[in-house]
Amino acid sequence: MCSDVCEVSTTNVGLNNRYKLSYVLIRKYEIHKRTKRARQWLNGERKKAMQQSKPIEILLVEDSPVDIRMTQEAFKDHRVANNLHVVTDGEIAMDFVYQRGQYADALRPDIILLDLNLPKKDGREVLDEIKTDDKLRAIPVVVLTTSELDIDVISSYCKNANAFLNKPIEFNDFLGMMRTIGDFWLSFVKLPNAPDAN
């Protein structure tokens, strides 16, 4: 009698373990399928960005040659359809966005990546001037800086910066951040069209 009970009990334990194992395997398979679908969708969005007829115009306002190079590499590696323009001080940045002087034929940027600590005209002044001009204020401005000061964060958002990001020191971290910017701003976000000149 006791042996029969033990045998049945052992059999049930074996079945329960098999059910648990099956459940775990099924859950892992479902997670794998969802992850695969998510990757396929993301790759599809990237392909759409690459295939669009008009590349996205990005203005990088940055005076550090190292950061410029890393940004160029990041966008090149990301392969988002874009034209990355680089200016190295705040005064030139304003010439670019206002299409003055040598930048008279420059295309209006769809998004601006702005460092705060710039020569000649500070990035904070550039941000303020762009966001108080009715013709420019719709351009998304992403602040990219080494500053972690609360006053810079608060001031940037008060001046209507669209995002405030701290630059990572390590290249791989920097690359990952720029890919995130590419995925979000260039693939998913609907950017505003430039207003008519009139």
Image (spheres, rainbow, N blue to C red):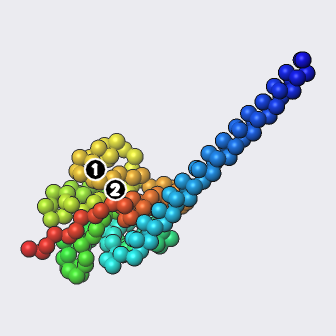
| Quadrant holding the C terminus | bottom left
Q: Position of residue 167 (x, y in %)?
A: 44, 55
Q: Position of residue 151 (x, y in %)?
A: 31, 43
Q: Is residue 39 above or below residue 18?
A: below
Q: Nearer the viewer, residue 195 or 143?
A: 195
| Residue at screen point 90% across, 17% down | 1
Q: Nearer the viewer, residue 108 or 93?
A: 108
| Residue at screen point 37% across, 65% down | 186
Q: Position of residue 155 (x, y in %)?
A: 26, 46
Seen as rendered, the residue at the extreme left is 198
Task: Provide the residue designation for mark 2.
Answer: 143
Query: Does label 1 or label 2 sit earlier along the sequence?
Result: 2
Quarter of the figure with residue 6: top right
**Secondary structure category for the residue under label 2:** strand
As drawn, the label of residue 156 is 1
Three-letter code, disc 2: Val
Q: Nearer the viewer, residue 140 or 34?
A: 34
Discs 1, 2 touching: Cβ within 8 Å = yes
